Amino acid sequence: MKLGKKILEDINNKRVALEKDIDNEISAAEQEINNLKIASSEKIKKIAVETSSELIKQLIGEEANSSSISAIVEEQSKKSKEKQHGI
């Protein structure tokens, strides 16, 4: 009787520890996903600014003001996010 109770107790303790490990792994994965979302958004903005600058240079033959282009890209990015989230 005591042996069966001890085995059930050990199994339960291992289950609890495993659930805790799984929860920790899920939290770490969710954090990594969020970090990647933030990083990818910034990289996309950088690419958009660089591409826009190059297009303007090719179209008009002059360098464009990079801060103006950055502001436009940032504004469009905000509008896009608002549209995606229904704001």
Image: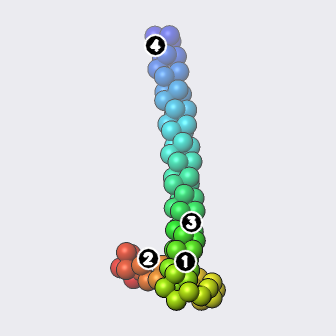
Q: Earlier in the sequence, mark 1 or mark 3?
A: 3
Question: Which residue: 56% across, 66% down?
Answer: 43
Q: Earlier in the sequence, mark 2 or mark 1?
A: 1
Q: Secondary structure at mark 3?
A: helix
Q: Residue 67, percent across and down?
A: 64, 86
Mark 3 neighbour density, 10 Å: few (under 14) some (14–19) many (20 or more): few
Amino acid under disc 1: Glu
Question: Which residue: 50% across, 45% down?
Answer: 26
Examine the rendered structure and indicate whether residue 37 appears above or below residue 12: below
In the displayed structure image, the side of residue 24 where residue 84 appears, left or right: left
The reply to whether discs 1 and 4 touch (Cβ–Cβ < 8 Å) is: no
Q: Earlier in the sequence, mark 4 or mark 3?
A: 4
Q: Residue 6, percent across and down?
A: 52, 16
Mark 2 neighbour density, 10 Å: few (under 14) some (14–19) many (20 or more): few
Distance Cα–Cα, label 3 vs label 2: 15 Å
Amino acid under disc 4: Gly
Q: Residue 69, percent across and down?
A: 57, 85
The label nearer to you, 2 versus 1, is: 1
The label nearer to you, 1 versus 4, is: 1
Q: Quadrant of the C terminus?
A: bottom left
Amino acid under disc 3: Lys
In this orientation, does residue 75 appear? no
The image's mark for residue 54 is: 1
Q: Secondary structure at mark 1?
A: helix
The image's mark for residue 81 is: 2
Amino acid under disc 2: Lys
Distance Cα–Cα, label 2 vs label 1: 25 Å
Question: Which residue: 49% across, 29% down?
Answer: 15
The image's mark for residue 43 is: 3
